[in-house]
Image: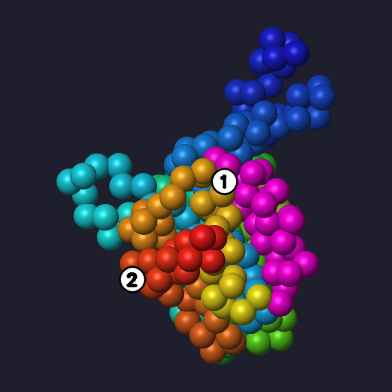
Amino acid sequence: TMSRDSNYDHHISIFSPQGRLYQMEYAFKAASSASGLTGISLRGKNSCVVVNKKKVPDRLMDPQSISHIFNISPQIGCLATGMIADCKAQIQRMRYEAADYQFKYGYSIPVHVLAKRIADIAQVNTQSASMRPLATVCILVGVDDERGPQVFKVDCAGHYLPFYGTASGAKEQEAMNYLEKKVEEMKEYDTDQTVRTAIMCLGSVLGSDFRGSEIEVAMVEGTNGKFRLLSEEEIDAHLSFIADSDA
């Protein structure tokens, strides 16, 4: 079928006779495989957590400068997988939208509003030939004062959906299968359980043990909590707890 459809993948805004937008499918492929990373996020009873493998491409680089986890506002965090330059462009826009909302309305932007706004912007990129969709999948997390913990996944086509737990990147499906088995318990997890489940999920799909310096973990707890990265010592403490409970 590819040879027949091969004329339909040069242009972003042209449908193939089968009703597919090939450039969008390629963008999804780029977003999931470009960084080679797998990101995981889940929400517990009063907190949200994101976990990601940390890959430093060059030993001469400062490892602290390499991260796929970002603050959008003090309370909202984002885990972005895909091409890092595209991720950063998306993050920049999100920060602008969050600050603009705060300025206009006098209170910080709810996670679902930000997710919808960014998805709407991403969707416009699928319509015009002058724009390229950003090869990113963003997972937004925050604890809303009305809706509680929120996890939203926004992709390059402009879908935005709420999740109890989700994943993005290279091993997305394996991670989702792992989380699916725990979906009922997850809703009652306290913060530590939420963090540990996310770390265990990443360990399970990567099939390897890692040190605290090899993963990034960030969380936000409670409606007044700030979204923050965990230090290496905190991650190591969780890892040794997991190792002890497995033993």
* Residue 14 image-quadrant placement: top right
* Residue 195 image-quadrant placement: bottom right
Q: Residue furthest top?
A: 3
Residue drawn at the location 47% of the way across and 55% of the way down: 52
Residue drawn at the location 55% of the way across and 40% of the way down: 170
Percent across and percent down for residue 121 are 61, 56
CA neighbours of label 2 inside 10 A, class few (<14), some (14 to 19), many (20+): few
Percent across and percent down for residue 40 are 57, 56
Q: Is 94 displayed left or right of 62 in the figure?
A: right
CA neighbours of label 1 inside 10 A, class few (<14), some (14 to 19), many (20+): some
Q: Foreground residue, 47 or 210?
A: 210
State which region is magenta: 161-188
In the drawing, what numbered circle is on residue 205? 1
Give the residue type that dot 2 points to: Glu
In the drawing, what numbered circle is on residue 233? 2
* Residue 152 image-quadrant placement: bottom right
Q: Residue furthest left?
A: 60
Residue drawn at the location 36% of the way across and 47% of the way down: 55
Is residue 24 found inside the magenta-colored segment of the image? no
Give the residue type that dot 1 points to: Val
